[in-house]
Image (cartoon, coloured by chain):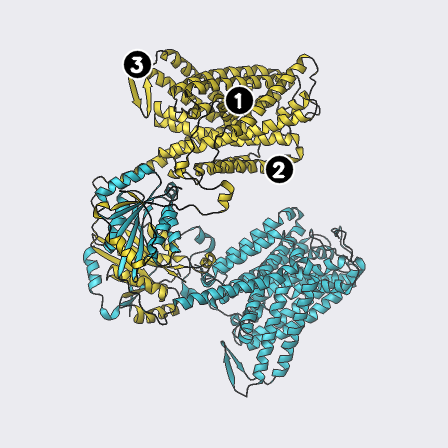
Chain colours: A yellow, B cyan
Amino acid sequence: MEKTRLEYPTGNVEKETKMEIETYPADNYIREASSNVKPQKSVQNWLIGNPLQTADAPNQTIGKLIGLAVFASDALSSTAYASQEILIILAYAGTQALGYVFPISLAIVTLMAIVTFSYEQTVHAYPGGGGAYIVARDNLGELPAQVAGAALLTDYVLTVAVSISSGVAQITSAFPTLYHYRVELAVAMVMFVMLINLRGVKESGMAFAIPTYFFVVTMFITVGVGFFRYFSGTLGTVVNPPVFHTDGIVSAITPFLLLHAFSSGTAALTGIEAISNGITAFKEPRSHNAGITLIWMACILATLFLGISFLVGPIHAVPSEAETVISQLGRTIFGGQGLMYLALIAGTAVILIMAANTAFADFPRLSALQANDGYLPRQMTFRGSRLVYSRGIVTLAVVSSFLIIIFQASVTRLIPLYAIGVFLSFTLSQTGMARRWWKSGHLKNDETIEEAGSTVAYDRQWIFKLCVNGFGAVLTLIVMFVFAITKFHDGAWVIVILIPVIVFIFYSIHKHYKKVADRLSLQNYTSLNIKRHRVIVLIAGVHRGSLAALTYALTLTNDVTSIHVSIDPDESRKVREKWETYGQGTRLVILDSPYRLLIEPVMEYISHILSIRQPNEIVTVVVPQFVPHNWWENLLHNQTALMLRFGFLFKPGLVIIEVPYQV
Amino acid sequence: MEKTRLEYPTGNVEKETKMEIETYPADNYIREASSNVKPQKSVQNWLIGNPLQTADAPNQTIGKLIGLAVFASDALSSTAYASQEILIILAYAGTQALGYVFPISLAIVTLMAIVTFSYEQTVHAYPGGGGAYIVARDNLGELPAQVAGAALLTDYVLTVAVSISSGVAQITSAFPTLYHYRVELAVAMVMFVMLINLRGVKESGMAFAIPTYFFVVTMFITVGVGFFRYFSGTLGTVVNPPVFHTDGIVSAITPFLLLHAFSSGTAALTGIEAISNGITAFKEPRSHNAGITLIWMACILATLFLGISFLVGPIHAVPSEAETVISQLGRTIFGGQGLMYLALIAGTAVILIMAANTAFADFPRLSALQANDGYLPRQMTFRGSRLVYSRGIVTLAVVSSFLIIIFQASVTRLIPLYAIGVFLSFTLSQTGMARRWWKSGHLKNDETIEEAGSTVAYDRQWIFKLCVNGFGAVLTLIVMFVFAITKFHDGAWVIVILIPVIVFIFYSIHKHYKKVADRLSLQNYTSLNIKRHRVIVLIAGVHRGSLAALTYALTLTNDVTSIHVSIDPDESRKVREKWETYGQGTRLVILDSPYRLLIEPVMEYISHILSIRQPNEIVTVVVPQFVPHNWWENLLHNQTALMLRFGFLFKPGLVIIEVPYQV
């Protein structure tokens, strides 16, 4: 079976055809032809670039320094809002409660250390990439995997909504006149990131490294200068702080309030799992490099988060939709809106947009993975003209834009929906790892189990590793419950309802695909035996188009019946008269339609014919289909053929033939 | 050819089938079957009522008193805004200009008398109904008829927009808190009138008579009491009048200003032609009754219009979007917002809504007429389940709602678009009548000409009648130009551009239908001669569905080629292996698609096959079509079959077969 190009005839057409048919070798009846059909030039090409061949799939690896830039933006960007979100909850209890910002941040950093340590183990166990979905699927089974999938997809959507909203909030802090257009700005940014991703981001390192390190450096300078001025006593407080609106709610400092504030702050942990998804992108030794990068990332994140949480106290920062805490910090530390202030705002805004970009990389990949497992529509596995999972990208953009519009680009209103999904996936991932160590511990030396694509080998340190992941799992589970309870009324209930619903949808989809596969399976297949054709031709009027359909029908069988639905008696009379001349002696049935319906009488007649169908008889409907020259001409004709097609498709055992007539 | 009911088999199915085929008499090969398929119960039925049979078309005639109620609402309702619109233009020139309201109204009433007299002649000449479209078509030819059609359709849309907006303005004058929701209210009312009309208004007289005569009586009482108080010196002026916003525009009393005000006031003439459309609805002697009703109507209209125009002066009414002049008049005459005031407002609002209803009767009828002549999409002639031209009704509702939203339900902003269409149709109608009298005068006694459906007979008074209609035509033409020039900047330019565009569209549609009819004509028809089938089966995978399609294809011909587009090499390998077992020895071509396109490689291959087609050979594409159980399952499958269908339809000479496989 050699691969031959599809060759176009150049000389005598008829001869060529005959040759092709006659010389077709009997032993070579399966042929491969290569087609080079490119998608046509279009606005789409201009927007997202020229199409790429499947063989062009990129393949490159990166070092630790670049790796940190690529994978850390999501995690590091949360420093832009985590401290502020703690502040907001505490602000309801008055100024003396603000002293708790730093202790709560310390607790969060402790949690962060444990989660990081847990993931560090995952990175080594899954050198091929170990996101929560894969770890749960391999070690815990389908249901936990789908729950993790639902949690992660929700989380990605929220990452985009929260990051872009926070990015816009930074910009509107510096340019308050834009505040009125924050929703439009945010949606435009989502569309921008979507386009970039539809083009296909070749995770080209430098494009990521520059803004990430710019952000890290400006943040360290800000925090550094802040501490210097704090210790030298020249820090001062925010000039013209925004006003905090309590909306009449005043709260006491209760354990619930502190847990509530803690929950808000856990947003700082989002994105910490990013590296475990992308281990394959690292240079060898992959796991080693990825692990070290993970630890660096956690250290930078913890330092910046603690620094900011410490400094918001002495400057008397006020949480507000109108000006972010980062902006207040910058103004106070740099004494006004100078160059350093603008650099801080720009760096923060850019890293937040890049965090959204991370979700745009992960959501389509995970949804394609789930679609491949049959839990999401198959179309999600289709790679668009630029070799990216374009449907996943568009879905993410649409859903997150929808959220931004609903929540008016307010980070504070989005946050209660955010972290449940993250912590649920943390829990499932850590539980999966714990299970894996348990299995590993019960193997003999050098023995391995192949399980659903991953290899489990004996590990001497299994008890220690089991304890680390187990402890991580329990802790994140507790945090998840704390979050769900304290933020239930703020909006967390949405997610508590949504995740089971999504999982249910996943299973419905899976059931459907399984059913289809069973029904189409060729087990016990016996070929159909068509002995007799019965053909029905639909006739709106007697003209060249319908007579072409009749002629075609007569090549199938002699048992041809033409049907005309009578709405206008004059028209029907004409049809009957012309039929005497042009009907080739075939039967014509005129169906009276007192209610001027077109489709329904035909459907009734055909149902009748189908009900008296004999074994091995097949019923075929021939529909003459008018084909216009220009699209708008379609508007001038009843789309009866199309409607009949959809009507007939639901009749079992009915074949539809459309004979087009061009004008 | 006796009419037999479609009978369903009750006993042995196979026997019944055979019987039906065998007993089919040779001389009775054309059969009529009566189907009683009713549209299914649905929300639609609940909204617009149960479907009606074609035979149920209503047929009743009405007397003069009821006829006035049915046809006068459009004309009489213009008293609600005509005086106000004159006032608005004059108000820019300060208070001394307001003295011109009454003289201008007198000029308009003179014009009204001439137009009425002209139409009275039309009513007698066209006892079968003589709208401007029919009169122009019969006497002036296609182009003037289509211009009249364009003018009238535009006019009907504006009648709805203006009347409903004015109706809402009356209501918001009495209940100012509703002013903020005027657009929503107006659109809701359009929808309400649309529903009523989709239900089918049996022009049942009483339903019209009550509100029309209620309006006429309250208006006469208002004007009567107004004059009584004026002459007894107790009338006074408007308490708390609304403020007139000049927007800084101050104008002198120039001839242009007066003509401008006159143009605005000509809105009073709209609707005067309604009776000439509906002559057939009158009791015999039809023309006589219709003519007398027309004169009554004009008298009532003239009296009320002059009365209101006179009274607005002494009470110092102020034109305003916030409170209508009618409301100010009512408040002043009845001394506050008592019962009589509310009756006036209610009567005015209801008659305005009924005026919109008139347009809902005329627009669909005219558009069906034009569609029947081939100048509008044929679908407009289709009568819906309630025997009304439902598509015309919905079109009118949508377009007028759109106008209401664009112009924010402001009568003053809609008026400049209004009267051009009306006067253009007046001019064409009168010119057509003049031409008719001219022809009539050149006939011998008792001689008649049959011309495009109307009979022209000799008329002794032809010179007088020619002069009346000719004068009417010239006068309305002049008014149209005055209107177009004085209101050009206010919005009349839209209509000046729109009407030629609409006429162009009419002609494009007509050209298309003529082309289709020519191409489908059976002149010189020779039957197709299909000698050879070449069949291409599209195979996504080898399963029961695609093998059923293959089996079907093999009943047509032996020349079957199956095509598989290869996107995933693994998938293609599987297809190739399975084909060896299940392919029934037929050819399989695997088309490589480096850009992951599905449709395009198939299209390219088929174009190639079509290009080497032999004479009398027909190429057929068989598409296995997945048919889901529930509609939502469609979302889980690529709609490749549907996309291919649309792609293939534009290839000449290609037949498409869809073999469905149910799951």
Q: Is residue A491 visible?
A: no
How crowded pointer 1 is (Cα within 10 Å; few <14, some 14-19, many 20+) is rated as many
Indicate the secondary structure of the residue bearing disc 2: helix
Residue B1 lies, with reference to residue A353, above or below; the image says below
Marks 2/1 in contact by CB < 8 Å: the verdict is no
Q: Is residue B490 visible?
A: yes
B587 or B17: which is nearer to us? Answer: B587
How crowded pointer 3 is (Cα within 10 Å; few <14, some 14-19, many 20+) is rated as few
Q: Earlier in the sequence, mark 1 or mark 3?
A: 1
Q: CA distance from mark 1 to mark 3?
A: 37 Å
Q: Earlier in the sequence, mark 2 or mark 1?
A: 2
Q: Earlier in the sequence, mark 2 or mark 3?
A: 2
Position of residue A139 measured from the top left corner of the image (x, y, whole percent):
35, 22
Have a look at marks 1 and 3 and say if they share a chain: yes
* Numbered tag placed on residue A181 in the rendering: 2
Indicate the secondary structure of the residue bearing disc 1: helix
A34 or A264: which is nearer to us? Answer: A34
Position of residue B260 measured from the top left corner of the image (x, y, whole percent):
72, 63
* Numbered tag placed on residue A268 in the rendering: 1
Residue B582 lies, with reference to residue A326, above or below; the image says below
Q: Residue furthest front?
A: A11
Q: Residue furthest bottom?
A: B445
Have a look at marks 2 and 3 and say if they share a chain: yes
Which amino acid type is marked by label 2?
A: Tyr
Q: Which residue is mark 3?
A: A442
What is the chain letter for disc 2? A
